[in-house]
Image: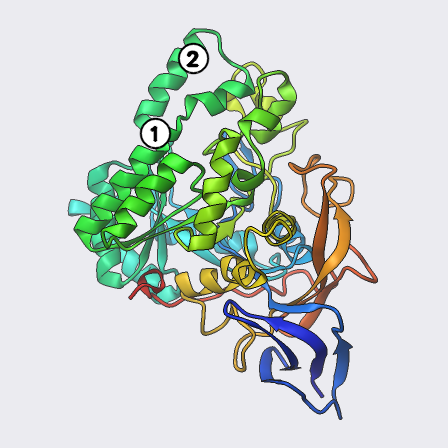
Amino acid sequence: MGTLIKNGTVVSAKDSQKLDVLIEGEKITHVAAVIDAAGHEVVDATGLLVMPGGIDVHTHLDMPFGGTTSADDYTTGTQAAAVGGTTTLIDFALQNQKGTLKEALDIWLKKSDNKACVDFSLHMAVTNLHGKDGAETLAEMEEMAKFGITSFKLFMAYPNVLMIDDGLMFKVMQKASALNALCCIHAENGSAIDIVVAQMIAEGKTAPHYHALSRSPKAEAEATHRSIALADMAGCAVYIVHLSNEAALAELQFMQARGAKALAETCTQYLVLSIDDQMPGKSWEEAKFVFTPPLREKWNQEPLWNALKDGSLSVVSTDHCPFRFKDQKELGRGDFRKIPNGGPGVENRLQILWHFGVNAGRITPEQFVALSCTNPAKIFGMEKQKGSIAPGLDADIMLWDSKVEYTISAATQCMNTDYNMFEGWKVKGNAAKVFSRGELVVDNVTQPGKFLGKTGRGKFVKREANAGGLA
């Protein structure tokens, strides 16, 4: 006996059709206009949209940063994702500058062991090269690709901690090109930013507001152009993470128009929050919105929405890196440099994207699926497993109620923080039911906000090397 989803409208990245969907075991086995219900458990999806489970390709669970650790571990973070309709995450394993990639992989697999509640994969952050001319670490990149980690993160920010120089970046890009792998770039000019930060602190400008002002859109734009230019020289495909403003977007589009293999994401916070509204420089509460890149002036939002519509931006992620306000963000009171960078968002990504995107007429339902499900699967080598409603793929399925109204609140969220960046916002559209590999793990109709599956059921997803889906 299978699970038969009947009477719903299946939304793909290309079109929407009235179709039935049959789940048997962990897989989708049949999709057709009418499927005989005999012998199957029927889930009536009348009035609902049947979509692939969301894929968030940018999260930081159980991550050490700034003297503390992000508030969501692999249990609370993946449960929050599921409640919001996301069934797959790609997190980041961070190489210690003195350590190996294998050591980083082992640490992050241990963090997730018996804790992940939905499926996940990892990007590998390369922060240093070991051996003559970096040969040891470059060889390790081959082992990572064989293991199914086919994307490598490079930081152009955070000097002396995560930041690499252009020479190291170029070597990694050359190796990634040879592996047909993808380089993910945190594009900010960290050296210039550090000078501005030091100058601000010397002038007594220590409030959270100055964190945003210290990290110029121009510093992001410069690094965006430089990283893509270096990748183009190396023959490497790149993916710019958390692109936040129009100036960086212009550099991306400039290089795309010239044939560079460059993709990029933006995040929900940059589409709907701004320094004007959330960080005008009036209170310590603004520490809630300290993340990197920072919030930008509100006029940057519409160019980002337009880029999602025209395809120059390919994905909407969250950069979910949560810290509690009272005991973690508090570490930076009196010195914005010490405020842990990051905010909670994995639970509300799809609600925000639907309400302010689809409901506002900025994107179509099909583009919603492309940006949050199908494109992430294709770009990161998972399209044979996830990201679409099709026979043979994992039965990661979300039944979406486009008419239900929902109020976002820290009081009812699953994320392990004492605040929500979208506190009190009323949105229209939410996941009604969520299936992960065929198992009903969320039913927001009968048991709202609860994860129904077993802790630790999530599996590691081995991904193919496909140069960001561009090859």
Relative to 349, say whether 435 is above or below: below
| Left or right position of 79 against 258 | right
From the top left corner, tell me how far across and down residue 11 is, in percent.
59, 69
| Left or right position of 242 against 111 | left
From the top left corner, tell me how far across and down residue 422 is, in percent.
67, 38
362 or 38: nearer the viewer:
362
In the rendered image, which residue does mark 1 sit on?
219
Query: Distance of mark 2 from mark 1, alpha carbons?
Result: 16 Å
In the rendered image, which residue does mark 2 sit on?
200
Label 2 Cα crowd, 10 Å radius (few <14 / some 14-19 / many 20+): some
From the top left corner, tell me how far across and down residue 367 is, in percent.
52, 60
Q: Earlier in the sequence, mark 2 or mark 1?
A: 2
Asked whether residue 380 is in view, the answer is no
Q: Secondary structure at mark 1?
A: helix
| Left or right position of 457 against 391 | right
**Amino acid under label 1?**
Ala
**Amino acid under label 2?**
Met
Q: Quadrant of residue 274?
A: top right
Task: Say whether marks 2 and 1 touch (CB < 8 Å).
Answer: no
Q: Residue at x 75, y 69 (%)?
A: 47
Relative to 133, say whether 145 is above or below: below
Q: Residue furthest right?
A: 446
158 or 346: nearer the viewer:
346
